[in-house]
Image (spheres, helix red, strand yellow):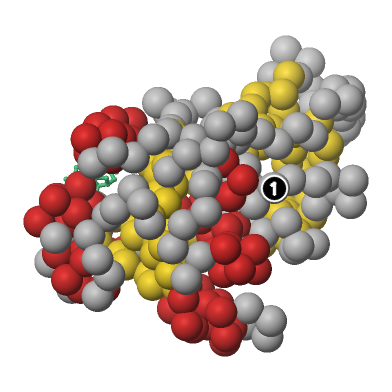
Amino acid sequence: MQEDLGVIAPEAPAVKIPGNLSEQTVLSVHHWTDRLFSLVMTRDPSFRFENGQFVMIGLIVDGKPLLRAYSVASPNHSETLEFLSIKVPDGPLTSRLQHVQVGDKVLVGRKPVGTLLLDNLRPGRALYMIATGTGLAPFLSLAADPEVYARFDHVVITHTCRRAAELAYAEHLTDHLPNHEFLGEDVSSKLIYYPSVTREPFKHEGRITDLITSGKLFADTGLPPLDPAEDRVMICGSQHMLDDLKAMLLERGFTEGNSSHPGDFVIEKAFAER
Ligand code: A2P
């Protein structure tokens, strides 16, 4: 075997980034739990999106972009982009993405999409944004959108997780946003944050479907039970929750909305990597 003479290995050849992606720089990383983290990164000034939309993000792996869909958690008036991600030990992307550091590069798609848009809903009195797990992300973006408060008298964000430690952004919703320089007044008077936990003791316990059926959500918030004449619903989370809640809403007379026909509720599956 040849002796190591201290020759520096040539750097890996630079990978050409496809035109449908931009390369952004990580500004901060926050690990909420061993299963959940957030990334803040620079934003390409030409990147435009609507609050509630998702975009492909990822890394170069084996010389090729490896991408997954992520809802943007930051509002579209922010100079930076924020994302909330689970960590899947064997997940092709998240097993790598969870280790990125400040200064690292992350790929961001140039074409945001998604159905969780204000314009896909008919006008109403209360807007319910119902999330499980990382499904909270698009609602963080919407919660910082002044248009949400212009259109609705009440804005309810429910977030259900297995454990209390997974209730990411609780402080942001209860402390930071209500004291926000421009949004604070609207948020303080209209936003209700309703966290619930299913697998350990907490002030609100149980699946959101059960809390709606039992009426506990309404008893706790002081709002009347869901009514398609008045209420609009956005849902983002695990497929089972989406299926169950959609069936409940259809049974109560709610109609699903989309970009050509605004309706009473809209749905999106939260990012999941297996
Ligand atoms: P549970 O602990 O009773 O399964 P996950 O981490 O699996 O994505 O789940 C996130 C949250 O969504 C958990 O609190 C979980 O409750 C809840 N959940 C899972 N399935 C449903 C469902 N079909 N309807 C309502 N909530 C659900």
Please tell me whether residue 12 is drawn above or below residue 53 in the rendered image.
above
The reply to whether residue 223 is visible in this rendering is: yes
The quadrant of the rendering that contains the N terminus is top right
Identify the residue at the far top of this view: 1
Please tell me whether residue 240 is drawn above or below residue 231 in the rendered image.
above
State the residue at coordinates (63%, 78%).
Answer: 183
* Residue to which mark 1 is pinned: 50
From the top left corner, tell me how far across and down residue 58 is, in percent.
66, 34
Please tell me whether residue 150 is drawn above or below residue 75 in the rendered image.
below
From the top left corner, tell me how far across and down residue 249 is, in percent.
28, 40
From the top left corner, tell me how far across and down residue 192 is, in percent.
38, 72
The quadrant of the rendering that contains the C terminus is top left
From the top left corner, tell me how far across and down residue 147 is, in percent.
64, 63
State the residue at coordinates (56%, 32%).
Answer: 261
Mark 1 residue type: Glu
Identify the residue at the far front of this view: 229
> Looking at the rendering, which quadrant does residue 140 occupy?
bottom right
Viewer-closest of 118 and 160: 118
Q: Residues within 10 Å of mark 1 (few under 14, many from 20)?
A: many
